[in-house]
Image (cartoon, rainbow, N blue to C red):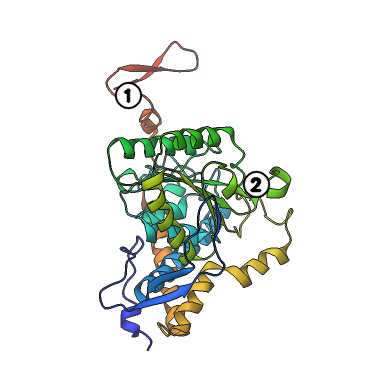
Amino acid sequence: MALTRSNLLRPLTTSLYRPFSSTSSDSIITVETSIPFTGHNIEPPSRTVETSSFELLTFFKDMATMRRMEIAADSLYKSKLIRGFCHLYDGQEAVSIGMEAAITRKDCIITAYRDHCIYLGRGGTLVETFAELMGRQAGCSKGKGGSMHFYKKENGFYGGHGIVGAQVPLGCGLAFGQKYNKDEAVTFMMYGDGAANQGQLFEALNMSALWDLPAILVCENNHYGMGTAEWRAAKSAAYYKRGDYVPGLKVDGMDALAVKQACKFAKEHALKNGPIILEMDTYRYHGHSMSDPGSTYRTRDEISGVRQERDPIERIRKLVLSHELATEKELKDIEKEIRKEVDEAIAKAKESPMPEPSELFTNVYVKGFGTESFGADRKEVRAVLL
């Protein structure tokens, strides 16, 4: 029986729904992942995943919100309201959604510059997201970070990093802190296939393995490092095997329930045995960044083929419909409500002012040192950084 319209269309909040766990009135729904997991030096988890009507509908709403947010960001960039670098996540939403379904806010996430949806998944709001993208004071980094430097420490989200691969050693440090403090929590260090060949990644992995840190390395393999296909950049593109002595798991990153199962499995492993690598087989619909049309190194048929056969939102939509949790019209009404919510968030973000010029000097040096800032001629003191 489909849910009533009033249940489905209750007002959407500006942050994503929490918690992901099913309510007591929800019956358990058992499904199989799209394809089996492939393990390296480890027995992979079962393909059978338990979910609920609440979780499936939440997955649909949250991924649809992320998709609409990124499409809106594309338009804002083309209107020159977003400047600088901007990397969009549409197509990869199942990785963020599935991961959040398996963990808690005690667990840490650190990622690269394709970070808008990860931030939203960690409890950020649409207004904070758009304000940061447009460089406004109401942004999550006070308008000073922009697209690549989202941050929400209180929710266990440590960025948002612009230097390729540099977030992985930082994640190793977060995992060290968790083990030292006996937090019984883990750190997910996310990076792309383009960063998978970075030397610092292997150094961090070696240290994590030596110290049995609760570290989970998540390679979001969208198959193109900027415009370079994985097979042109890596002699071995089996990234889940790259750890050698560290076990790994290959996951269909376009299947939110498979990601949930894999992350739950990885967390249990990391708490007992130390690091593990998860390779998420995913795909981005946009180009690498806004300066990349995304069609010079791959065909439009390839992109449309992934949309038709593997789109993460459409997979959840089919599950919702097949289990009669909602009707087509109800799902379309939810998407209309999301579009309205995104438009309202953009309008509110535009009302936020730009940072004051004095903000150039904050968050640079330790407070209280009385550091002086000079002009270009080194003669006139322009500011004292209190």
Q: Position of residue 288 (x, y in %)?
A: 62, 50
Q: Residue at x 58, y 33 (%)?
A: 199
Q: Split into 4 quadrants, where in the image is the C terminus? A: top left
- Classify residue 256 as left or right of residue 122: right
Q: Which class describes the residues within 10 Å of circle 2: few (<14), some (14-19), or many (20+)?
A: some
Amino acid carrying label 2: it is Met
Q: Residue at x 28, y 72 (%)?
A: 23
Q: Position of residue 181 (x, y in %)?
A: 27, 37
Q: Residue at x 34, y 61 (%)?
A: 14
Give the Cα distance between marks 1 and 2: 36 Å
Q: Position of residue 343 (x, y in %)?
A: 43, 64
Q: Quadrant of residue 363?
A: top left
Q: Earlier in the sequence, mark 1 or mark 2?
A: 2
Q: Nearer the viewer, residue 344 or 353?
A: 344
Task: Provide the residue designation for mark 1.
Answer: 366
Q: Are marks 1 and 2 in contact (CB under 8 Å)?
A: no
Q: Residue furthest bottom?
A: 1
- Classify residue 376 as left or right of residue 5: right
Task: Provide the residue designation for mark 2.
Answer: 226
Is residue 80 in view from this perspective?
Answer: no
- Classify residue 349 as left or right of residue 92: left
Q: Is residue 197 above or below residue 26?
A: above
Amino acid carrying label 1: it is Val
Q: Is residue 360 above or below residue 139?
A: above
